[in-house]
Structures are given as C-alpha cells and as structure tokens.
Image (cartoon, rainbow, N blue to C red):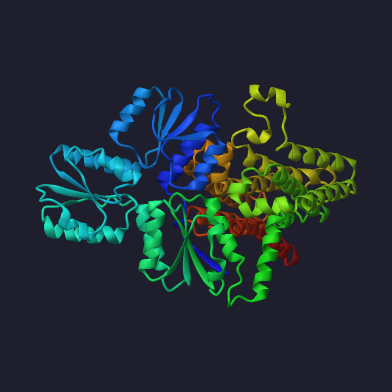
Amino acid sequence: MKVKLARTAGFCMGVRRAMELVLTAANRKDDRPLHTYGPLIHNTQVLDLLKTKSVTVLKDLEGVSGGRIVIRAHGIPPAERDKLKKSGMEILDATCPKVARVQSLIRLHTRKGHECIIVGDSDHAEVIGLMGYSVTPPFVIQEVSQVVNLPDLQKPFVVAQTTQNDSVFSDVVTALRARFPNLLVFDTICNATHLRQKEVRSFKGQVDAMVVVGGYHSGNTQRLAEVAREVGLKTFHVETEKDLDLKALEPMSCIGVTAGASTPNWMIQNVVRTIERIRGQREPRVLNGCRKVFETLVLASSLVAGGALCFAYAAGFLAGSPPEIVFPFIAMFYIYAVHGLNRIVDKGAGIYNDPEGARFLTAHRSVLVGSGIAAAASALALALSRGLPTFLALAAFIVIGLMYSLPIFPDRLRSRRTYFRIKDIPGSRSLADAFARVAVINVLPLFSTDPGPYSAVAVSMVFVLLLSYGRSGLFDLLHLQGDLIVGKETLPLTIGQKQATLLLRIVLGFLGVFLVVSAIAGWVEVFAFWMLIPVAGMALCLAAFERHWIRSALIMEALVESNFFLAGIIAFCADLFP
C-alpha cells in the first residue's frame, strides 16, 4: 500500500520542548520526585512512557511537598502558578512559547480595559489557563452561532486557542467584526497548526483516505481530522496502529497519514508500516515482494555492509591505487559484524527510533548473532591470509568495536560512575564509528602492504573520517527522539539539534573544500574531484532531514548508505576507464 506521509506530522516545537525538558530532568541523577502538573501533553502512550521513568501526574498539590514539578505545555492560570511557588518545589516551566505569547496578549490588553474573546474549547487546559490571565471577565466561544450570545462589548479583542481550526477562527472573526466594528484581532493560531491543516487540505485528490494519528483527547489532532473531513476525505482518527480498520483501507491504493502535535515519531512509524503492509487493489505482488527484500537488506545491516565494501574500495583508490580486493571485503565483514552486534546489544532506543527495526532484531536475534559471528570470523580469516600482524590488528579492532556498548565497570561500581560504557560519553557514538572505519579501511592495509604516497594516504584518511562522521552524525539527528527517551548523550542532545546540524554542515563543507585543495595541490590525483559527488549526496541527505522531505527511517538510511555505494561505483569506473 502506498502511503503519503505529511511532512508536518508529529511533535511541534512546543511539545518537543516540553518532552526534552521533562526527559532531561528524568534522566538526570536526582533523588527528588518528578511530577507534571496535569498531563504534560494529550497523548496516552507518551504519558505511559513517562510513568516508566517515574514521572507522575499531579491533579492538585494536596499532600505534596518537595521535589520537582513541570508546568505542562498548555500552561496554567497565574493563581495556580502562585500555588506552585508556595509549595517549595522546583518549578520547571514547559509552557509552549506560543501559548505564553497569548497569555501575555490577554494580560496586556485586559489591563487596559479591553474585553477578551477566546475562540476555543472552554474545557481545554490551554483555554482554562488563558482565561486566568484576563483581568476583565473573558468570553469563550467555539463557533459563529455563539457570537449573538455575547453581551454588548465596548473594547473587544479576540484571540484563538493555538490549535484552533483556522477556517473556524476566520469565520468567527468575520461574524465578530460585523457586530463589533472596533474589534482588535490577534491571530494566535500557531504556525505549526496552520501548516498542518493546510497540508491536510492539499491531500484532497491525491489520496483515497486520510489517517490522523494522535490522542483521542488531543484538541489539535481532533481538528486535523475535522479539517480532513471538511475537504471530503474519508478520515480515520487512530491513536495507535491497533486502531486501524485494515479491512476498510484494503480496497484503496494510496493513504495519506498525518499526526497531531503531541504524537511521537515511533507511533507514526508504526502506523505507516502497518498500512504499507496492506496490499492495495492496484499494487502488484512483485512490488510488494521487492519492498520486503529492501526492508530486510536494510534491517539486517546488509546495506551498511555493502556500502562499507564500496567505500573501502573508493578510499583505497583515493590513496593512490585500487586496494587489494581482500581489504574491502574485510571492511564489509567487519562493519556487518560490529554494526549488527552493537544494534542487538544496544537496542533500547531502537524501540522509539525505529520500531520496525527493533521488532526485526528481536524476531531474528539468533540468526543475526550467528551471522555477525560468522562475519567476524570471515574478516579474521581474510586478515590472517595477509599475515599475522594484520590478523592481530583486526582482532584488536573487533574487540574495541564490541566494547563500545559493553560495560567498562562492574555493577557494584556503577553508582559511583557517570559513564559506564564508551557509548555513555557525550557525542562518542559518531566519533567512535568514524574512527572505526578509518582503522579498518585505511590503517589495516598498512600492516601488510606498502602505502602509496603519504599525502594521498593522509587525504584518504581525512575523507573516510569526515564522511563517516557525517553519516553517523546524521543518524544521531534521526534518532534524537529515542535517544532522549532512554537517556543517551549523543551530540545533538549535548549541544542541541540546531548546533549539531550546523556542525555537520561545516564538516561536509570543509571536506568538500579539502578535497578540491588536495587535488589542486597535487596531494592526490584528480579522482578527488569525483569524490565530491558522495559528499554532496550526504549534504543533500542532511537537507532532506532538515526539511522533512523524507520521513521513513528505512528510506533515509538507504539514501545515506547509497552515497558509499556511489563512491565505490565511481572508483570502479575510474579504474576501468582510466
């Protein structure tokens, strides 16, 4: 089944900020209890997740003293905030900045004597909070028909619940202006809501039906479903993939999927993958079979291993001459073994980053472990054929690679240590992967073969290091949500997503300039210019992530790895047609 996933689906800025704040607090070493004042967001599955991290929901402050408390994304009235301050607890404010702006507008204008009209749901947490900031009595309406029920107002102004249906707000404003010519209008619907609703409307004529993923009690999710129905799309509102009506979807050929602002990425992926498994009326069996083969290649680490083989060949060519073919195969087996076994050992975040991959690892664990051990043995056998020093060096690389996810200190010492494994060191994952590739691709051949020009060897090492770092750094960005949940300290979580993205741009930009300078200076052959293509491809993948062009984790991983295949293909052609 073909799925068209909305680029705007999933966490909005305010929810992402609230989740980062509460999860960072939950992962911090602090014995004080952590509470949220009311549900952090309207998503049952996320709230269940927070329970597993000992985050409790408080409806009131009775009998509570000490600890930390998080103000939810919807905000709270000033009177309740004062109660929190008097409770003596540390306050962590997760109020969405967009909501805080509306609160400020209401407080400012009602202090000047203006009357406040709020277009929204009177029983919604955000609207209850907004009403508390009004000095004059506020009025809450939901639709045009309620405008006539308002009293005669002298200095009215209108704001909207940030997740309000924009067409409803526009109609209400038109009716209000007809009755109150001096009306002040503040369109406070957040931009994310505008974009989501606009994208849903654009799906009309492109899909057979619309699936909206999100909490049944989430106002913004309900409005997305409402908008989809307004434009005539057959609409299904589901919380999880278990709620899908598979029989109703089966006759269709293309399904649109969007999600509310409080819906995490792993829930969206689960729904998308479930729909994709449905064989639509016009989908050929061959296409369905090809998709399954593709998924298996990606999930079983075969794609990353093949990319390593091609990349090693290209790196050797860049270093002065095509390498002995045994070394690219050693790199392939090594990467398959270490990458696959580390994924099995360290699959906690995978449940949230890539649910399908996590299920695949669980279902085929024994086969994957066996094939990983066989790959490591094959790599060692090939290395032994090149001499004992090469064999010992590779054995050391494999041990170091496997140690990345294994505990360094025994359990009895863990309470005294901040970092128990190499992977616990902030930002270590990307660097460890990059240096591992340099070791097996660039360093290992030096134990049994004469190196080419030292300048070319050095350039090749920099090329492998930086392009591999770009690959790993991009995956760190893709896996940000799951890593945050399990408490991993990756580079994006340490320095921030924007800073990490900027760093990757700088790394890839520097690599491109470095290759050009190296070729012009004569440090390497003109083949270096051709290696600008995979560098540009990696930069394009980064842009695709930033702009949400591709939401599928499998497709993104395949595109990233394709740059390494491309490097090998270019090197092979350069060797074949000098």
Q: Residue at x 77, y 48 (%)?
A: 337
* 517 on left or right of 75: right
Q: Nearer the viewer, residue 47 or 529?
A: 47
Whole-percent x, y for residue 444 in the image = 79, 44
- The image shows residue 498 at horizontal and vertical percentages of 47, 44
Q: Outermost residue toward the front?
A: 63
What x and y, as percent, mark residue 271? 55, 59
The residue nearer to you, when weighing 19 against 417, is 19
Q: Which corner quadrant of the image does residue 285 belong to? A: bottom right
Image quadrant holding the C terminus, namely bottom right
Q: Is residue 196 visible?
A: no
Q: Is residue 163 above or below residue 291?
A: above
With 122 as the anchor, is 528 left or right in this view? Answer: right
> Residue 105 in the image: x percent, y percent?
23, 42
The quadrant in which residue 287 appears is bottom right
Would you identify the image quadrant in which residue 75 lies? top left
Q: Is residue 337 visible?
A: yes
Pick the quarter of the image with the N terminus: bottom right
Q: Is residue 41 left or right of residue 116?
A: right
Residue at 37%, 58% in the rendered image: 223
